Amino acid sequence: MDCAPCERPRARPVPIKIVIAGPFGVGKTTLVASATEREPLTTEEILTRAGESVDDLTGLGAKTTTTVGIDFGRLTLRDPSGAHPGVVLYLFGAPGQARFRILWDELTFGAMGVLVLADTRRFDESFEILDLVEERGLPYAVAVNTFDDSPDFPASELRGSLDLHQRTPLDVCDARDPASARSMLIMLVEHIKELALSS
Ligand SMILES: Nc1nc2c(ncn2[C@@H]2O[C@H](COP(=O)(O)OP(=O)(O)O)[C@@H](O)[C@H]2O)c(=O)[nH]1
Ligand SMILES: [Mg+2]
């Protein structure tokens, strides 16, 4: 019987579940859509007048839609040296409004880490999310998304305002830019790796 030369199957990238969290309008759907290597799965719906009294759009400019379920994307990060099969990130964008906190347990189940998005125009709105993440002991990194009218603060001040642990990574990004969105995810994965190696 003929047999084609046997090749060792290429090892598959290790799957990692990542949650993208942050307040309403901070850029979660945008970041997942920029970072994903496939068409993102989104659950955007047009904001209606019925939501006016519950969804505060102050400072959110022209936001016309909202996420009613989750955003889903996928990003493979290969090891350039080829020594490791790399990782494939499964990105789950959480809806920002407080009424969706009920989904939080399911959403974070099995997650290896959380990318928390923050907006310097409404920094205080990230506190509740940070508390939720810390309560679960999940590794996280903070991505400060910049909007045209975002006030500029030095990183040290941002870290102080959010009362971050010195090891928790924080950086500024533009969620619309794929390279910038992906660099935030790489920052988180590096942090997860570091924590795993040091525990
Ligand atoms: N200028 C600017 N606009 C952004 C950025 N990220 C998101 N947006 C816009 O901000 C609005 C809210 O973003 P969205 O991703 O829906 O927020 P979500 O509610 O957190 O999912 C949308 O109109 C986006 O186009 C950014 O980095 N810069
Ligand atoms: Mg959204």
Image: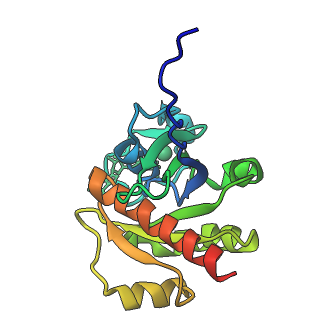
Please name the residue shown 77% across and 53% down the image: 105
Q: Where's residue 171, x and y in %?
A: 37, 74
Q: Nearer the viewer, residue 115 or 29?
A: 115
Q: Which of the 4 quarters of the picture holds residue 135?
A: bottom right
192 versus 169 height, above or below? above
* Whether residue 23 is situated above or below residue 150 in the rendered picture: above
- Residue shown at 49%/32% (left/top)? 7
Q: Tally the numbered discs.
A: 0
- Residue 4 in picture, x, y percent from top left: 48, 19
Query: Residue shown at 69%/49% (left/top)?
Result: 107
Q: Residue at x 58, y 62 (%)?
A: 114
Can residue 147 be seen at all in this image of the molecule?
yes
Q: Quadrant of the N terminus?
A: top right
Model colouring:
rainbow
From the viewer's side, name the closer residue of 161 and 58: 161
Q: Position of residue 177 (x, y in %)?
A: 26, 52
Nearest the viewer among 19 and 90 is 90
Residue 60 is drawn in which quadrant? bottom left
| Residue 82 x/y as whole percent | 40, 54
Specify the quadrant that holds the C terminus.
Answer: bottom right
User: Looking at the image, can residue 54 be seen?
Assistant: no
Quarter of the image where one finds residue 172: bottom left
Please say if 192 is above or below 40.
Answer: below
Q: Residue furthest left?
A: 148
Q: Is residue 146 left or right of residue 20?
A: left
Q: Is residue 7 above or below residue 99?
A: above
